[in-house]
Image (tube, rainbow, N blue to C red):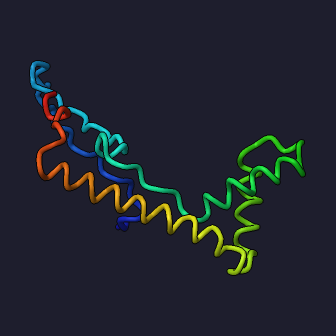
């Protein structure tokens, strides 16, 4: 007598399905989020790293004019940021903190206007 491992697999029974009617509504693709946030809302400020990156990019391109790709500049910037002592980073954290405070103040004004109905809801008309 043969064991299961010695016998081949049995063929599957196939069942014929009725074709789908072509008039049925197809699923609609979900709209992708735009990522832009609300229109008219204040834009979120960059982090301390991005303020550092602005300064670093200028000096790095002057020292290395042959480097063209942003990937290489970004990689060098990340390495420099990670090895920098905190005392040097404080300057950029201060800038980021000031910008964040301005953003929060502007956002509070925006929310106040939005809640009072001063802002028109044009995006809901679509």
Is residue 40 found left or right of 22 in the rendered image?
right
Dividing the picture into quadrants, the one containing residue 83 is bottom right
Q: Position of residue 115 (x, y in %)?
A: 14, 52
Residue at point 67%, 73% (across, down) = 89
Q: Is residue 5 above or below residue 28?
A: below
Q: Residue at x 22, y 55 (%)?
A: 111
Q: Nearer the viewer, residue 53 or 24?
A: 53
Query: With 69 as the anchor, is 51 left or right in this view?
Result: left
Provide residue 114's location: percent of width, then percent of height.
18, 49
Q: Is residue 54 left or right of residue 39?
A: right
Q: Nearer the viewer, residue 76 or 97?
A: 97
Q: Quadrant of the N terminus?
A: bottom left
The percent coordinates of residue 3 (x first, y second) are: 37, 68
Q: Is residue 83 above or below residue 15?
A: below
Q: Taking 89 as reference, is 47 above or below it? A: above
- Left or right: residue 54 versus residue 98 is right
Which quadrant does the C terminus fall into? top left
Q: Residue furthest top?
A: 23
Q: Position of residue 120 (x, y in %)?
A: 16, 36
Residue closer to the observer: 102 or 58: 102
In this view, the residue in front, 11 or 63, is 63
Residue at image location 82% in from the left, 53% down from the top: 60
Tag count? 0
| Residue at image coords 74%, 75% | 84
């Amino acid at each position: 007598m043969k064991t299961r491992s010695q016998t081949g697999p049995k063929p599957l029974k196939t069942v014929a399905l009725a074709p789908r009617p072509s008039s049925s509504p197809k699923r609609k693709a979900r709209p992708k989020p735009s990522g832009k946030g609300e229109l008219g809302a204040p834009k979120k400020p960059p982090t301390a790293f991005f303020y550092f990156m602005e300064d670093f990019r200028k000096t790095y391109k002057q020292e290395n004019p042959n480097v063209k790709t942003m990937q290489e500049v970004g990689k060098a910037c990340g390495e420099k940021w990670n090895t920098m002592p905190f005392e040097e980073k404080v300057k950029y954290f201060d800038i980021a903190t000031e910008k964040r405070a301005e953003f929060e103040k502007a956002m509070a004004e925006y929310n106040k206007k939005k809640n009072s109905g001063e802002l028109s809801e044009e995006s809901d008309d679509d």
